[in-house]
Amino acid sequence: MNDARLFLAIGAAGGFFTVLLGAFAAHGLRDLISPGLLEAFQTGVRYQAIHSLALLAVGLLIDRAPHALLRWAGWAFATGILLFSGSLYMMAAIDIRWLGMITPLGGMAFLLGWGLLCWHYLRA
């Protein structure tokens, strides 16, 4: 599978799970976890949604004009979703607060992805 198709597939799957997890939070978690943990879970959903769209954009950009910086940006976004949103989901699901220490690593991956996109287009 080429890079464009891979990032398009990851972005589409991320969008699917954004809707699924958002609905789960709204209808299934509301009465099971504290408001603070629910808010953390919803923050994970929101960031996953944004960066799933970013992955779709990266896939389309790579399809148009492949470049290593775009590939690295895609991997940074995918890693950010896993670390940022994943740590918030796990923290909310099992109420282990130290998992929140992983969240900033995902945030750094998101920043790296956006920075790589910016660098790619500033140097183009």
Image: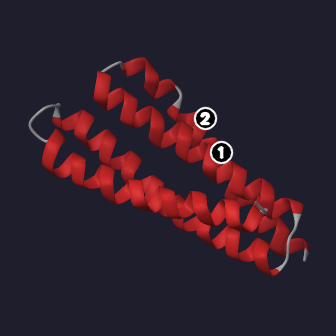
Question: Does residue 104 appear left or right of residue 30 in this picture?
Answer: right
Location of residue 17 in the rendering, given as x and y in whole percent from the top left corner: 40, 53
**Residue 43 in the image: above or below residue 37:** below
In front of the other: 42 or 122:
42
Q: Are marks 2 and 1 in contact (CB under 8 Å)?
A: yes
The answer to whether residue 112 shows anywhere in this view is no
Seen in the image, is 100 located left or right of residue 43?
right
Rendered position, 31 above or below 3: above
**Count of numbered marks:** 2
Query: Mark 2 is on which residue type?
Result: Leu
Q: What residue is pinned by disc 2? A: 105
Q: Is the residue 32 above or below the residue 50 in the image?
A: above
Q: Which quarter of the figure has residue 23?
A: bottom left
x and y percent of residue 28 in the render?
Answer: 15, 43
Between the C-alphas of marks 2 and 1, the distance is 6 Å
Q: Residue furthest bottom?
A: 64
Q: Which residue is mark 1?
A: 109
